Image (spheres, rainbow, N blue to C red):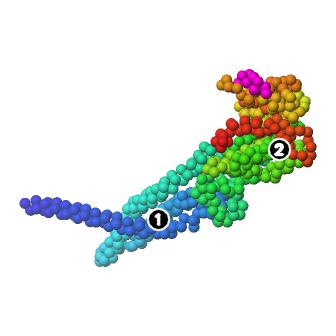
Amino acid sequence: MIELVIIAMGVLGFVFVMVAAFYIGMAILAMGALWSLVISSISFFTAVKDNLDPYLSYHDKNPLAPQGVKRNYFFGPGLQQFIRIILDAFAELVATVQDYWDAFTAIAISFEPLLIGEFWWPLAKRFYYLTLTVGSGFFGFIWMLLFSILLGSILLLGMLAFFIPFALLWSVDRLVLMLRAIQSRCPNCKHISVIPVFLCSGCSKEHKQLVPGPYGVWRRSCSCHTSLATTFLSGRSKLQAICPYCAVELAASNATQYGIQLVGGAGAGKTTFLTSFWHLYQKKLLKEGTSYRVHPEAAFSELEEWFQQGVSAVTAETNAQAYSIIHRERDKTPFQLTLYDIAGESFEGKNFALQQRQFRYCEGVVLVIDPTGDPEIATAAVTGFIDEHKSMRGIPAREMSSTTVAVVIAKGDLFLGEIGLPGIDTLFRSHPNRYQDSEGRPSYGIAQDVICRLFLQQHGFGNLVNLLVSELSHIRFFPLSAMGREMEPGKPYNPWGVLEPMEWLLEYAPNYRQRR
């Protein structure tokens, strides 16, 4: 019986000890978790405080960064700030745990039987610091991980709230440029750029890729602190633009383009045609009330001076001179018409002194033929143009692009009886059914085309006509006289038939048609 009592008491004692140990352990565990929360919070918020300004430790390594302009928080500084906070917080927590461990190892325990206090008290202190070390290390890591996830989630939400509108703004800017076919064409190197280099309106500093980005979303600050628009919609095109390839000033950065190349042999009359066209065209624009500006202004002033003085000039430049007319109407995308005039020698023979990059994108061509010249020289010039045109656009020899080509017979005043406008008009009225378009309707334009082709064939240019018809898929012939008479210095030109071929070409420019 006594043995049973002893066994029962032993079992009860064991149970009591286990229960007590369990609750004491749970209490220690809870205290460790709470204390680690305090330690982790102190470490984390100290790290936040020390890294509150992300730009103190951030170094922008972009060589094109505007001097004195801070990079946007979400394009690098924010991520670096997050990383530094987490690293500093964990480093502070580790340092605290290390302090507890050092305190634990520094306590000596004596095993002298008579020195009971010197044994139990250090043992209790060791247990205390061991508890802090394990609790802070284990639970502190968990708390710090939760804090890091919370901070990372906040940063991620902020980035989403920033980058979604940012991506939409960037996309809308490019979409507007694409849908409106807006681009810039350099008058010097003839390269195309969608986003050229813009000059600061305050200090003329160059800004490449002035788009929503790391240094500004809707607007960007220059190093001189001038605020610059970064999108087409916010007014970027009001800034002066230069070519990103050769730094030459561009005519416009917000316009739909339409280019026309003037082609012809030496002395064919390309520049004279251009001179008369500009005089008549500017009168037409003024009559219609269309607002416009020209680039370069000096070149257009020279054309008008030649017209009024009744003189002409020979183009000597092998790099095409670009004459740009920017049409501006309210609430409509500007329309830039550019005519390229180049020396006739550039088209004579197959060896070009300079490749004409504008051949890759010119939408129209005016081919000037001098009926008083040598047909073989004219044919050689046209052959050179066609070969170069194919080469620049990568078109196989058996094909030719569908570039619209207006073939103009210059010096028509010398052949009024054959290709004069009154004579063509008489023939058309007498036999309108001979000159029908694809829909079977009488067409004065078809009459001009047929009569001009027949005229060239009768004057020894049959091979040239055959070459043009076989190689070009969209072509029409026109008669004209750019000067209207023999050259008489001091007396203005008296042109006729000059606007018609240009208006025919412009009928195929979508943005130009919308203005009519």
| Residue 510 % position (x, y) | 65, 39
Q: Foreground residue, 64 or 94?
A: 64
Q: Residue 36 placed where, x, y %?
A: 38, 66
Estimate the x, y position of residue 272 in percent, counting from the top left: 85, 41
Q: Element under label 2? A: helix
Three-letter amino acid code at disc 1?
Answer: Ala
The residue stretch that appears in magenta: 426-437
The structure residue drawn at horizontal position 59% and vertical position 50%, both measured from the top left corner, is 173
> Where is 399 relative to 345, above or below?
above
Identify which residue is drawn at 86% across, 39% down. Answer: 484
Residue 39 in the image, given as x and y percentages of width and height: 40, 68
User: What amino acid type should be assigned to the residue bearing mark 2?
Assistant: Thr
Which residue of the protein is positioned furthest toward the left in this rendering? 1
Residue labelled with disc 2: 275
Residue at figure coordinates x 81%, y 32% from the top left: 421
Q: Between residue 132 and residue 448, name the one nearer to us.
A: 448
According to the picture, the residue beneath numbered tag 1 turns out to be 89
Q: Earlier in the sequence, mark 1 or mark 2?
A: 1
Residue 219 placement: quadrant: bottom right
